[in-house]
Amino acid sequence: MKKAYRVKKNEEFQQIFKHGHSFANRQLVLYFMKKEDQAHYRVGFSVGKKIGNAVMRNQIKRYLRQAFTELEAYIEPEYDYVVIARNPTKQMDFHEVKDSLLHVIKKSKKFRQ
């Protein structure tokens, strides 16, 4: 995933949390906020220390990054997204993480056919 597709700064995360909307399932929370002047989506990931050690947290972020890359054609482009992983994600493999992300995106109605 290119750097232009990432939300990295704390101020950007806080703005999305404060002014955006959220949808969740048992494994993931998805925050999103519309940005009119963007040609493509941007995404940030948050995996807390309660989920596991650094290796586990980085693995979950890699799974989420790859899932976003594979679903890129179906995601609304003019939004910023933040995905927060919950505790059950530590027992999930890539396909389960992707299915959970797809479920949350469809629930938020940001999935285009």
Image: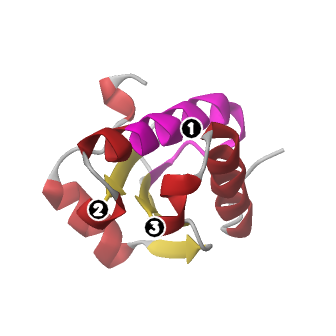
Where disc 1 sits, the SS reads helix
Task: Look at label 2 and name its amino acid.
Answer: Gly
Q: Residue at x 53, y 65 (%)?
A: 88
Please state which of residues 99 and 11 is positioned toward the viewer in this rendering. Answer: 99
Q: Quadrant of residue 61?
A: top left
Kind of residue at badge 3 = Asn
Residue 65 in view:
yes
Q: Residue at x 51, y 42 (%)?
A: 64
Side of 63 relative to 110 (left or right)? left
Image point 50% across, 74% down: which residue?
A: 22
Report the residue marked by disc 1.
68
Q: Is residue 86 visible?
A: no
Marks 3/1 in contact by CB < 8 Å: the verdict is no
Q: Is 94 left, or right, of 11 in this rendering?
A: right
Q: Position of residue 105 (x, y in %)?
A: 66, 58
Nearer to me, 57 or 76: 57
Residue 83 lies, in percent from the top left, at: 44, 57
Label 3 sits on residue: 87
Q: Which residues are magenta?
A: 59-80
| Mark 2 or 1: the one toward you | 2
Secondary structure of the residue carrying numbered label 3: helix
Spatial CA distance of label 3 from label 1 is: 20 Å
Query: Which mark sits nearer the N-terminus, 2 or 1?
Result: 2
| Residue drawn where x is 45% and y is 54% of the image | 81
Q: Earlier in the sequence, mark 3 or mark 1?
A: 1
Q: CA distance from mark 2 to mark 1?
A: 19 Å
Residue 8 is situated, as x and y percent measured from the top left of the image, at 22, 44
Image coordinates of residue 28 in percent, x first then y, are 53, 64
Residue holding disc 2: 48
